[in-house]
Amino acid sequence: DDKWGDEWGDKWGDNENKVLLLISQNNEISIKKIALATGLSTSGVENIISRLKERNIIKRIGSVKNGHWKIIEEK
């Protein structure tokens, strides 16, 4: 299911789309695993996640180790 890539393509950058797609496929994915899957650095992924959180697109539920991501703004 590539709904983020199709529907968010014009709204967000490629890297944001990749992060959202990975989170939509596995809401417990770690920043390290997102970095490995996208080829981005962990600090780059952290920056993207910070921007997505600032825009109220995603939020973290629970702790870093035991929590999960929630996508707030969906199409």
Image: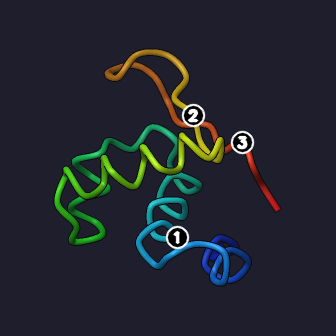
- Would residue 28 be found to the left or right of residue 38 on screen? right
Q: Earlier in the sequence, mark 2 or mark 1?
A: 1
Res 63 → quadrant: top left
Disc 2 designates what residue?
59
In the image, residue 41 lies at what x, y percent? 17, 60
Q: Quadrant of the C terminus?
A: bottom right
Q: Which residue is mark 3?
A: 72
Q: Amino acid at mark 2?
A: Lys
Q: Are marks 3 and 2 in contact (CB under 8 Å)?
A: yes
Q: Residue at x 73, y 77 (%)?
A: 7
In the drawing, does residue 5 fall left or right of residue 35? right
Local SS, label 1: helix
Question: How far apart, in angstroms, are the residues tagged by discs 3 and 2?
Answer: 7 Å
Question: What residue sits right under mark 1 in the picture?
Answer: 17
Of residues 30 and 44, which is closer to you in this image?
44
Task: Quote the CA–CA distance across marks 2 and 1.
Answer: 16 Å
Sort mark 2 into few (<14), some (14-19) or many (20+) by Cα contacts within 10 Å: some
Q: Earlier in the sequence, mark 3 or mark 2?
A: 2
Residue drawn at x 32%, y 56% as measured from the top left: 34
Mark 3 burial class by Cα count in 10 Å: few <14, some 14-19, many 20+: few
Where residue 36 sits: x, y (%)? 21, 62
Residue 23 at x, y percent in the picture: 51, 52
Q: Is residue 66 above or below residue 2?
A: above
